[in-house]
Image (tube, rainbow, N blue to C red):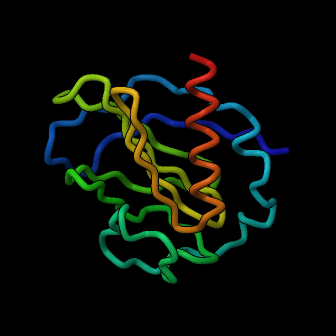
Amino acid sequence: MRTLAWIAAFVVGTAVGITATLGAVALHRDAWRSIPLSSDDLPRCRDVGTVFATQMSGALYLQDCDPRGLTVEFPDGTQMRAARIGEGYGLESSARPGLYYAVTSWGPGLSASVRGSGTVQAWGSTDDALQRELASVREEAGAG
């Protein structure tokens, strides 16, 4: 099984004032368990500019490819870059304390979520990516 990490990242751009988190956050291993070993061989996704989180479900340009480097935009205008397969970026809002953004590359599949004030909004390019994102959110909540 691969050893995979959740990595703190810097923001591409923002509309609400975001600062990067300053530490790695450990995710429960179950969330990463089913990433196929062959995912390292996936071709890079074609650059489509900005991927809107609310429109990634079923997007053909995100199917069977590595989304590394694509920009994901959240509904509030916050933007993050997708990491390589098996990694995720997370950051906290400096404008709205307690609001946390995440983008994870599942190989294949890309997910994004916004967490805060007891709520979670999550999106995925595939149902599998969405379910993995929700599983990782549940695991983090249980570990906290």
Q: State the image quarter where residue 26 is shown.
A: top right
Q: Position of residue 117 (x, y in %)?
A: 33, 26
Quadrant of the image containing the C terminus: top right
Q: Is residue 49 left or right of residue 95?
A: right
As displayed, is residue 77 above or below residue 107?
above
Residue 30, quarter of the rendered image: top right
The percent position of residue 47, horizontal first and vertical second, equals 40, 77
Name, please, the residue furthest toward the right: 1
Residue at x 33% of width, y 40% of height = 10
Q: How many marks?
A: 0
Image position, residue 97 (x, y; %): 25, 23
Near-viewer residue (43 or 59): 59
Residue at 44 percent of width and 43 percent of height: 102
For the point 60% across and 58% down, the residue is 129
Q: Is residue 43 above or below residue 81?
A: below
Q: Could you say where residue 133 lies in the image, as x and y percent from the top left? A: 57, 47
Who's the residue at 38% across and 42% down the image? 114
Q: In the rendered view, does 64 fall on the left or right side of 3?
A: left
The residue nearer to you, when weighing 84 against 29, is: 29
Q: Quadrant of residue 5?
A: top right
